[in-house]
Amino acid sequence: MFNNKPSWLIPTLVASAVALSIAGCSSDDDDPIVEDDKGTVMPSPDPSPSFPENAIMIEDGENLTIRIQEALINAQTNDVIVLPKGNFKIASTLLFDGDVDGDGTYAKNITIMGYGMDETVLDFSESVSGDGIFVQNAVNIIIQDMSVNEAKNNGIKLKNTNGIILRRLATVWEGELDEGNGAYGLYPVECENILIEDSYVRGSADAGIYVGQSQYIVVRNNIAKENVAGIEIENSKYADVYGNEAMGNTGGILVFDLPINNHRYGSSVRIFNNKIYDNNTKNFANASANPAGVHIVPPGTGMIILSTDDVEIFNNEITNHDTMAVTISSFFIAEPDMGAFVANYGQENQPIEDGWRPTPRNIYLHDNVITGYGKKPNGYLIDDIIKAYLFTHGQFPGVLYDGLGEMLSNNGTAAYLGLQEMPFSTDGSDDVCASNNGDVSIGRLYANDNTDMNIADVLFEPTQTDLLKCAQVSLPVHTVTFGDEIFGCGVDDDVAGCDGGILIGGGGSIGEGEGGLVGDGDLTLCETTGSEVNWDALLGANCPKLSDYNLFADTKDPSTGANSSGMPYDMNTQLFTDYSSKYRFVFVPEGKVANYSSQESMDFPVGTVISKTFALPANTSQRGIENEDMVETRLLIRRETGWTALPYVYNSEQSDAVLAKAGAIQGKQIVHNGETLDFDYVVPSMNNCKQCHQFKPDADSPAVFVPIGPKARHLNKDYAYADGAMNQLLKWQSVGILQGVPDVATIDTVPAYSDGDEIGLASLTDEQLMDTAKGYLDVNCAHCHRPEGNASNTGLTLEYWRPYADGHGTCKSPVAYGGGELGYDIVPTAPESSILHFRMETNLPGDRMPEIGRGLSHGEGVALIHEWIKRLPVATCSP
């Protein structure tokens, strides 16, 4: 709830109390984490699973990860995929993409299931990637009856999906509770119509169940035990959370609305009929400077409402919390420095302009049983507040409302600062209210008539008489629509006391019909003869061998000899992949032409193929195909329904490459700058390719597959063709495969940066360095880190054309990533304090960025970003 210890938070009458030694308010940060004596609480045993006759049964045996991944890639509408019974080591993220063909039309009604959370256990402790299961671009997906354990980052993550049932699942990090555990257990983000039920989450270093930037949500009948946050609803709308048990966490249930600057903000959340108890575990999240990360949650907190409007909390049992049962806070408390607040959130293109507001309104806490709080209030971030209450009133309140946002709104300060907070409505509809919660004590830090934010009021009532004494209209029942079914309190169950009456649900815009090939298409097309590209096969089949497409005169040498006038090309700055050499070609069918695009990839016609071969030299000082082992060739094929990605892995003879839909992991060794580097080279699966190549124009449009590299700013350079050097764009236009190219001197072009250039970084001007760093981030990061990309939920934007001040993460807190002790994406003048720099430098699967596509850190790229951050202008978060 609270960040640093601001001087203005301590009223004069309490100043002397800070020096007092008050036994009841000492921090327990040094206390060991103690297992409770109640034993492990688990949901009821799973019912015996039943499978349809046509279910796809995955058998136990060798290459299980690859076989599961292939089943997910090949899945068609209405498929049921059954994972085997047993405990299995899984080598990498299991990824399902409902739009593997990349046309923006999604597979529907897919079920992924096991035999029960105790019977099918997927162990990701040795995985080379961060997430356990990752689902994106789906309509109506069910995941049930299994356990996902020890994921490096998140247990089960879902993105851009409409219709989700997560049922009878477990996500577990066993052993000691540790900041090295994965962040989230069950983790839908940017999704719609989400039902999470009858599941068990334990050991998450952030939130066990986390629903973010989503709408139409039901979370019910789950057990969240020994996480930092048991259940968290963040920046989401229309959520009902009921029938759950949250125990042994640091904080039981959190409802947050954070300034993420991507138009996704939360409201209308109901928390009811839950048992929230014994949430007194030491906070084991990564500590950071992020003002609203879960590391700020005081141990011993039942529930936190932060900056969210329209929240109703009723019929819960909230018992036995060392600090407090419920706290309701504005973001002004989380970010107490008003100068920094205005600088970080209140300027042009920042969250306030984007629609976010820091003050909670219309909060109604009623008819709860609240007992056993405040016996040992602790948490170093609220130490001064604890001391203020204990000194002034001798006890800490069970329900605490900060009142600061309301005060600043009503006295005009927030509006004066440009924060667009209007005074609370005179009819009381914006008020924070509490009623019929028994004998719980009530605290309010700032009175409504306070005009001096430098002096808190520290109001307190041992039993409620006047503070927060009001009522609000109950919120409606929130429901989930899944196909023809509707789920919600009193809708598909017999739960009483749902209140509300009116139903809100049935919404959602993600997903459309189906498209693309059925299976692998017509494989008879893969028979090829002659010297021309096999265009029919490219459009109609996922051929088993690269040679089936006849792209090259000699398949053993895809660095030259392209058939059908295939055109080689290169880029100003490379997308790093483990120091591999890359040989790129574009093939455009005769008589067709691409249209020039000033900002996105060229608009290529149907039939276009982009080929990229990755080859590893034994020593990076001796490149050339004759000194290299070919690892893979990736094809991007523009079919009638959109772009499709096919990865081909070379055989041991280097004579051909075979289709590897599920990708591959190969142990490799390379010498770079005299140092021998051993690493796992990861060939991406078809679904992995979609993660990076995804483009979603807006919230209401489907995500489609697009190329990354062939943009004007990356192609605008000379290439040494066989008939002489020429600008690549002009060459493509001259041979008739591109039209509409402007004067190339007018194209905003990414500066060239290659390995070895790092030695000259000190000689670059600040302007040159800015352009070079932005160009590197554009090609290596911005395909995801843009509003239309797969990392849209992070709010971090890194496109080259975007002005530095309008994005790029300066003094921006991360949305989901903990960052260890790091609190901001970029801290100008301090590279070692910047999350961006750290994630580029590390090779840990749960931390590295890009998260797929590399096993090594790009030292030369890290050096560039280090120098850039070091020379950035001082900002509010700079040391």
Image (tube, rainbow, N blue to C red):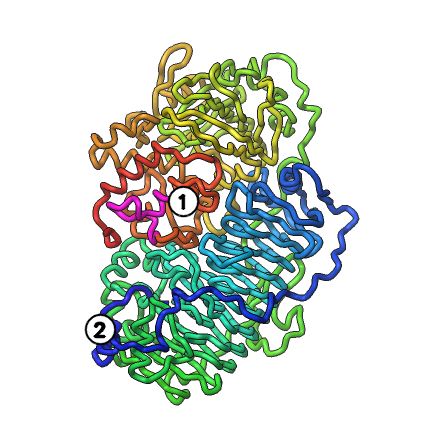
Q: Position of residue 536 (x, y in %)?
A: 63, 24
Specify the amino acid type for callout 1.
Answer: Arg
Q: Report the residue marked by disc 2.
A: 454
Q: Which residues are magenta?
A: 822-838
Q: Quick one: label 2, few (<14), some, or many (20+) residues within 10 Å? A: some
Does residue 7 sit above or below 151 in this rendering?
Answer: below
Does residue 529 sit above or below 119 in this rendering?
Answer: above
* Number of numbered labels in the structure image: 2
Q: Quick one: label 1, few (<14), some, or many (20+) residues within 10 Å? A: many
Q: Is residue 211 visible?
A: no
Does residue 753 sit above or below 334 in this rendering?
Answer: above
Residue 452 is inside the magenta segment? no
Q: Report the residue marked by disc 1.
A: 786
Q: Position of residue 857 (x, y in %)?
A: 40, 35
Q: Farthest bottom residue?
A: 465
Residue 833 is inside the magenta segment? yes
Q: Nearer the viewer, mark 1 or mark 2?
A: 2
Between 625 and 587, the one nearer to me in the picture: 625
Label annotation for residue 588: none
